[in-house]
Image (tube, rainbow, N blue to C red):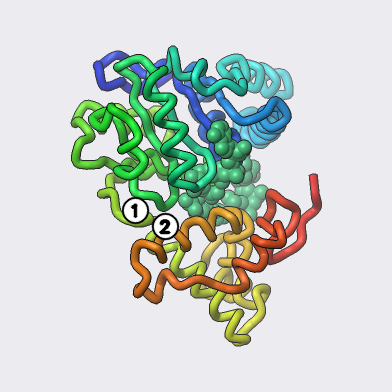
Amino acid sequence: MIVRAMSSSTQPIKTVAIIGSGLMGSGIAQVAAASGHKVTVVDQSQEIVDKASASIQKSLGRVVKKKFPDDSKAQQTYIADVMSHLSLQTDAVDAVKSADLVIEAIVENLDVKKSLFSSLDKAAPPHTIFASNTSSIPIKDIASSTTRLDRFGGLHFFNPVPVMKLVEVIRIPETSDETYSALEAFGKAVGKTTVQCKDTPGFIVNRLLVPYMMEAVRLVERGEATPRDVDIAMKLGAGYPMGPFELSDYVGLDTMKFIIDGWMEREPNNPLFSKSELLNKLVAEGKLGVKSGEGFYPYNKK
Ligand SMILES: C[C@H](O)CC(=O)SCCNC(=O)CCNC(=O)[C@H](O)C(C)(C)COP(=O)(O)OP(=O)(O)OC[C@H]1O[C@@H](n2cnc3c(N)ncnc32)[C@H](O)[C@@H]1OP(=O)(O)O
Ligand SMILES: NC(=O)c1ccc[n+]([C@@H]2O[C@H](COP(=O)([O-])OP(=O)(O)OC[C@H]3O[C@@H](n4cnc5c(N)ncnc54)[C@H](O)[C@@H]3O)[C@@H](O)[C@H]2O)c1
């Protein structure tokens, strides 16, 4: 059964434009298409969107193995059906012209996000709702680049999107009740549990998770344990599915650095937000984690 969210004008959200086709954008596109929405995914080059298409198909391959075990025909039909709801392109302005909902999942940088939303605001129809998947930037700061504050909110998904069951729905004071309801309904329509949070640094999950991950890095910097032993300890001693170094590599060390730098700028005296030389060094060397082939650990380059 296809469950669709409602847009702020109480029309069902049928079409979704997702800007950014990296780790998060491709995952959000997958779950939105799988729940029957018409999805357009945008990134900066054809090469990047081709890579995203391949990664969505690979991820769907994992989904169908569970959904239709031992039925390769049903697996192929399902993948083809989901992919038929998806198109990938490089023109964001064109993509938002027919979108009921725009979800931004580009680099964690306020100026870049504002510049994108400012141009999309002029191109999207009046009813279109805008949402950011930012990990750490205040939604109100991003929304200030548009004229649709009442139709703006945060939709914070988790990595890997097809597996993680939560979406945080964030409202700013101007977000209308209709917009909030539509965002919440969209989260549910793509199969997630939603929680509400005010527009505070890191919302709920990252406000607790990122200081923990950064403290693990500082523990290693102080020479108290190796990353490997910290990871083993937190998995076996605290029941986490990944240790903090594995998780940092999975999230992306550039994203981690953007998050902590942004918070430190806002609250320079908060020791939970203090920077790490080790993290900065790895990012400067291009060691961004799984996506670049190396972070705290080496990975097989794909
Ligand atoms: C910073 C941001 O703002 C916020 C964030 O996102 S913070 C990060 C939040 N994410 C986490 O904390 C992730 C923690 N890690 C985990 O939960 C697990 O390690 C994991 C789900 C990533 C992988 O699980 P693990 O058991 O180690 O590996 P694996 O067996 O390959 O995968 C488990 C299941 O998920 C599925 N899966 C994993 N990745 C998938 C993907 N990208 N697409 C589809 N399915 C996937 C697998 O097929 C498998 O399904 P099965 O159990 O039916 O066989
Ligand atoms: N990585 C995570 O675990 C995670 C989890 C939740 C939220 N987020 C947030 O989601 C957003 C995306 O993170 P990600 O991990 O997917 O990053 P990523 O680096 O994997 O992907 C970002 C993509 O955005 C594209 N991009 C950059 N500027 C663009 C523009 N102007 N127009 C179109 N595309 C553009 C890049 O080419 C890249 O493909 C960030 O705001 C991040 O903080 C990340």
Disc 2: which residue: 206
**Does residue 291 appear left or right of residue 187 in this picture?**
right
**Does residue 24 appear left or right of residue 138 in this picture?**
right
Q: Position of residue 236 (x, y in %)?
A: 58, 72
Q: Which amino acid, mark 2?
A: Asn
Q: Which mark is residue 203?
A: 1
Q: Position of residue 136 (x, y in %)?
A: 41, 52
Q: Which mark is residue 179?
A: none
> Within 8 Å: ligand 1 and the Cβ of disc 2?
yes
| Residue at (52% x, 39% y) in the render | 106
**Which class describes the residues within 10 Å of circle 1: few (<14), some (14-19), or many (20+)?**
many
Instruction: Look at the image and tell me in which quarter the C terminus lies.
Output: top right
| Residue at (40% x, 61% y) in the render | 263
Q: Please indicate, yes or no, whether residue 99 appears anywhere in the rendered image.
A: yes
Q: Please indicate, yes or no, whether residue 70 appears anywhere in the rendered image.
A: no
Helix, strand or loop status at disc 2 = helix
Report the front residue among 238 and 156: 156
Q: Is residue 179 above or below residue 247?
A: above
